[in-house]
Image: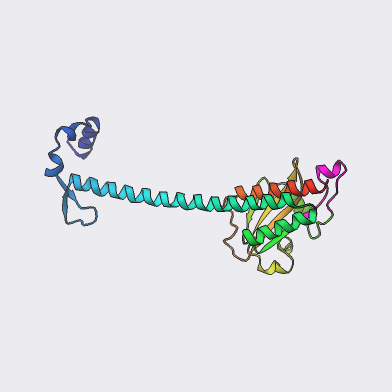
Amino acid sequence: MNAADVARYLREHPDFLNDHHELFTELTVPHPQHGGQAISLAERQLHALRDKIRLLEVKLSELIRFGEENDDISTKVHRLSVALLQAGSVDAVRQALLDSLREDFSVPYVSLKLWGTTAAADAGGVAYPDAFGVSEAARRHIENLRHPYCGAPESIEVAGWFGEAAPHIRSLALMPLREQGLCFGLLALGSAEAERFYPEMGTLYLGRIAELAAAALSARAR
């Protein structure tokens, strides 16, 4: 009989140690932290349980921290929603976006580019004219994005959307603005920190902010 046989026997007979509980005190195993010291099976089990508890405590702390962060972001998104609802014009929507993103979300550089028409404009609303600095190729790229893009600027043109701040942009988020599936512009967030917007980051809240901005702009264009 080898070690594998013993392990298999114990798995197949889970009541063995319960029927021979004296083995817990008679058998000894190496201490998990002090190799030269022998401890009983019961003590070894306690060490294993403590290790599991420590891991669970770490995971619980992470979940609590993530939950608090999400609550904080949700509160900021709610404040933005209220501000956009109160905005009575396209210019007021712009200002509400700038104020919220810069003050609440601490985004130093914000650029809003609007072009073409929205579904509202096709029905008699206002067409957006201010897409200065956005090439046709860039528009097609933005329109093809299924989710917000996060990462380094892909071109000089993209960095240039932030005006005089262009040389300082190390990372950005590009968020298409759509109404009824039609992309009519973008909201771009920029940072001098390369790690602020990175490819692997979650974009759930960025997408929601873009949806809120698009809905507010479309409503005020009617």
- Left or right: 207 as drawn, with respect to 45: right
State whether residue 141 appears in this view: no
Which residue is rendered at x = 32% and y = 47% of the image?
A: 52
Q: Quadrant of residue 198?
A: bottom right
Image location of residue 32, percent across then percent down = 24, 53
Taking the magenta stretch, the answer to whether it contains residue 122 is yes
Q: Quadrant of residue 102?
A: bottom right
Where is the N terminus found, in terms of image quarters? top left
Image location of residue 201, percent across then percent down = 57, 52
Identity of the residue furthest to the front in this view: 86
Image location of residue 14, percent across then percent down = 23, 32
Query: Tell me, what colour scheme is on the image?
Result: rainbow
Can you say whether 160 is above or below 221 in the image? below
Which residue is rendered at x = 67% and y = 53% of the image?
A: 80
Taking the magenta stretch, the answer to whether it contains residue 166 is no
Image location of residue 160, percent across then percent down = 73, 64
Count of numbered circles on the image: 0
- Left or right: 142 as drawn, with respect to 30: right
State whether residue 100 appears in this view: yes
Foreground residue among 82 and 16: 82
Which residue is rendered at x = 20% and y = 48% of the image?
A: 43
| Region rendered in magenta | 112-128
